[in-house]
Structure formats: structure tokens, C-alpha cells
Image (cartoon, rainbow, N blue to C red):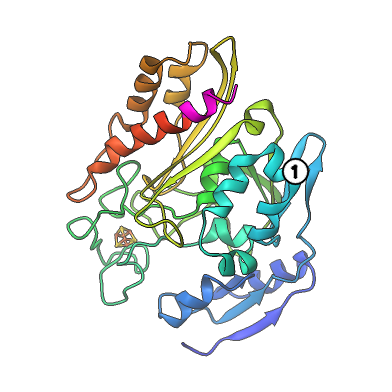
Amino acid sequence: MKPFDYVRAARPAEAVGLAAARPDAAFIAGGTELTNLMKDGVLAPGLVVDVGGLPLADVGLRDGRLRIGATARMRDVAEHPVVSGRFPAIAQALLASASPQVRNRASIGGNLMQRTRCWYYRDTASPCNRREPGSGCAAVDGQNRWHAILGGSDHCIAVHPSDLAVALSALDAVVLTLGPDGRRSIPLGDFHRLPGATPHRETALRHGEIITGVEVPASPVARNSRYLKLRDRASFEFALVSVAAGLTLRRGVVTGVRLAFGGVAPRPWRAAAAEDALRGRPLTEGAVAAAGRAPVRGAEPREHNAFKVELVQRALADILTDLGGNR
Ligand code: SF4
């Protein structure tokens, strides 16, 4: 690991000021991600600004919205009664993530900022446009079983690894930030960028800008929501395909539906066309099948991940059956 300067910020504005003054600065909170990347030589910040002690760990309902502070720990959020009772997809996504030890340390802001698990990204001997712009993408013609079937480009086909981000996307969350130019509210769907020709630019954050929290509107759809994660092993594993869904029915007809997929794209993949295929229709097997085809229309599977096209459809059928039986 290369030597670096370290400073612990006491207030959000102080953290922003410290990082904004140094182009080589990076933020750290729980330390479960950045330290690994630094040890592996993937990232080498000259200044590490510790935001883990900032007073941003609040969780609760305010004005009809769930507010989760950026430094709240994953475990604390998953176990919060408001989250588990009124936003179960969020609690389930958190509990499906990482390991108990990691969830005890990792922060909500850090979870949204985590880097891809593409093995070439973390192997500094491999070409990777995300780690080293212009070097190429080893995954396009390499081992791409875990990689994207939607939203990728010839420059990068990595998937975003966060389970939480998928649930937040489905439930119309907004990311709250503070930067050198003040506060912003960024819809979760706009927070993570598609790679295009610049996969190294991963989020909408500007240099020196920090996440202060996320907000999620409370709704009947959020209350009847689920998260389903399909993976190679039952714990401490990233998704091959995941789906977050919220559903309301009246006399068997879909009155509200929110759907987002993980493990298939460089960012949480909101499935608006699948929602349109269900809204206002009876929740029949045929309607579910039609909805399952919508998100993978135009999918571009690679050599090792064509199975994800069918897995998306099966995952959606499973979760809608579960939710539909709940009403
Ligand atoms: Fe790098 Fe993206 Fe290619 Fe993986 S898929 S090697 S992260 S450019």
C-alpha cells in the first residue's frame, strides 16, 4: 500500500472542504471497501478523509419519507423496525449483503459507492478501462459469467454489486449530498452512471461531494415489497441476478408496482416496461410472463452469461407470486 495522509472529519462541511482541496482525496467510512482496494493497489489516494464519525447515522420516518443517514451501519438499518416493517425490500437487501461482520462495519453511503466486483478490475495485471482509462476491457472476451447483459458498452460490461441500491431504485429513493457547491438531491436512478466510453466515471458525485443520506417515500407499494437474490452460494456472495419488487392489488388487479433488477447491468436496472406490462391488469401467469420478457428485450448476453436472460424472468415470476399471495 502506498503511503497516504489521513484526517478524521468532525462535520460534513469540514469533510467536503478537506477533500475538495486535494484532487487525490478519497472518503472512507466503515473501511470495508477502500482499504481492500488500496491494499490491492487498485486505488492509491494521497489523502483519506474519514467520514465514519460524522453525525449522519439517523434512521427514521419524517414527513412521509424514510430517512437513512449516510453513516448508519448496514446492520442497524436492516434491524430498524420502521425499515423492516414498512420497507421490507430494503431490510432484506441489506441482510442478503456481505457477511454479519461486514454489515456491522459498512455504512449506507459506502454501500452505494462500492466498486464493481469484476475480477479484472481488482487484478492490476489485467487491462481494465474502469481502473485505467484506455487500457481495454479484459471481460468482453474473457470470463464474463457475472457481467452485464443490459446497459454495458464495448468499454465496460461490469455490474454494480450493491443489493441495497436495487431495493432503493425500485422504491424511488433519492440520494442526498453535500458538495463544494452546496446540497443536492439525486434520484437513485441517476446516481450510478452507465459506462459508455468513460466507465471510470461511476457516479453523479463531483469531487469533494459526500453522500449525507437517502430518502425513500413511504407507500403501500413499499410496505408490500420484497428482495430476491440468486447467487452461487447462500451467503457472502454477490448476485447473479436479483430483483426488488413492490406490489399492490385490488381484487386481483395490479394497482401499484415497482421493479428493479441487480446483477444484470452497470447500475440498478429499473424495469419501467415490465411495470407498464402489469399495471392495471390482473396478476395472471400470462401477465407475469409478459412482464418478465420486457426487461430482457434488447439484452446483450456475452459468451458465459446468456443464462441471465432466463434467470431474470424466473426471478420476477417468483417474487411476484410471493407478493401476490400476500394480498
Ligand atoms: Fe474493467 Fe469494466 Fe472491463 Fe471489468 S468489465 S475489466 S471493470 S472495463
Q: Mark 1: give few (<14), some (14-19) or many (20+) Cα within 10 Å.
A: some
The quadrant in which residue 256 appears is top right
Please say whether residue 323 is one of the residues in the magenta stretch: yes
The quadrant in which residue 252 appears is top right
Q: From what the image shows, is residue 242 above or below residue 324? A: below
In the rendered image, residue 239, in percent from the top left (x then y), is placed at 40, 51
Q: Is mark 1 within 8 Å of ligand 1?
A: no
Residue reaching furthest to the front: 325
Q: Quadrant of the C terminus?
A: top right
The residue at which mark 1 appears reads as 82
**Residue name at image x 45 percent, y 75 percent:** 37
- Left or right side of 233 for 208: right
- Left or right side of 305 for 224: right
Q: From what the image shows, is residue 177 above or below residue 7? A: above
Question: What secondary structure is found at the residue carrying circle 1?
Answer: helix
Near-viewer residue (292 or 18)? 292
The quadrant in which residue 55 appears is bottom right
**Residue name at image x 76 percent, y 70 percent:** 14
**Residue name at image x 69 percent, y 29 percent:** 219
Q: Amino acid at mark 1?
A: Val
**Residue name at image x 35 percent, y 36 percent:** 312
In the rendered image, residue 162, in percent from the top left (x then y), is placed at 50, 53
Q: Identify the magenta region.
A: 320-327
